[in-house]
Image (spheres, helix red, strand yellow):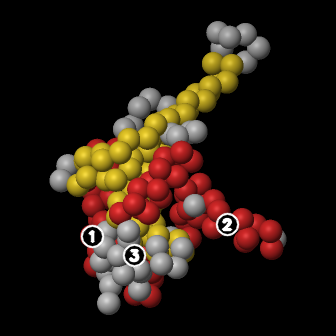
């Protein structure tokens, strides 16, 4: 029997995510990209610049962008994970990756919220991370990550390279780990 996520509980979850992310991100609900609609979309933009002695001599400037997409999917399989990771690397990247002058890093991450995630699907999430340099790092790089959130176990699945993303979205799941160190 496949478990379901109660609609009102999921709305509470989205409200909590929105409250948490809105401190640093611009957050939108029901966000369409191409043929997909995401329950929540969060966008972060940061520009850093430094000047030497006088304000007319710019030493450096760089831009960092982050995009987090959240979508509930009732029946997640390893094929679902592969499908959405491929979507992120192609369609998602096409719509969200903007290479501006002084681009440093863009992170494109998606969280699939599922009632349950089986072992095979959990293993697929551990391979759903890509980091790529742009023009031999002259125009920075981008990371693409797919994370899974198992509603019934209250557990997050992610690839090793996506731990920082997982920490920023699901910080409460890392507090016990941090105390052990």
Residue visible at 57% across and 47% down in the picture: 20
Label 1 vs label 2, nearer the camera: 2
Q: Name the residue under label 3.
A: 115
Residue visible at 80% across and 68% down in the picture: 179
Residue visible at 63% across and 59% down in the picture: 171
Q: In this view, does 52 lie above or below 131?
A: above
In the image shown, does 30 or 178 lie closer to the viewer?
30
Q: Which corner quadrant of the image does residue 62 belong to?
A: top right
Measure the C-alpha gap from mark 2 to mark 3: 21 Å
Q: Is mark 2 on a helix, strand or loop?
A: loop
Lower position in the chain sequence, tag 1 or tag 2: 1
Q: In this view, does 118 lie above or below 9?
A: below
Q: Mark 2 points at which residue?
A: 174
Q: Which residue lies furthest to the left in this view?
A: 35
Lower position in the chain sequence, tag 2 or tag 3: 3
Q: Which disc is residue 180 wearing?
A: none
């Amino acid at each position: 029997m496949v478990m379901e996520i109660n609609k009102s509980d999921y709305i509470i979850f989205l409200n909590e995510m929105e409250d948490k992310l809105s401190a640093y991100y611009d957050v939108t609900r029901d966000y369409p990209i191409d043929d997909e609609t995401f329950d929540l979309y969060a966008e972060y933009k940061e520009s850093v610049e430094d000047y030497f002695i006088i304000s007319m001599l710019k030493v450096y400037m760089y831009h960092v962008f982050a995009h987090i997409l959240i979508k509930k999917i009732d029946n997640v399989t390893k094929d679902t994970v592969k499908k959405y990771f491929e979507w992120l690397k192609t369609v998602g990247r096409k719509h969200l990756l903007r290479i501006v002058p002084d681009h440093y890093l863009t992170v494109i991450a998606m969280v699939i919220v599922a009632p349950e995630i089986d072992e095979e699907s959990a293993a697929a999430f551990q391979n759903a991370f890509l980091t790529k340099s742009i023009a031999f790092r002259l125009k920075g790089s981008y990371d693409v990550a797919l994370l899974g959130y198992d509603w019934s176990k209250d557990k997050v699945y992610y690839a090793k390279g996506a731990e920082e993303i997982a920490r920023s979205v699901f910080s409460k799941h890392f507090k016990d780990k941090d105390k052990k160190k």
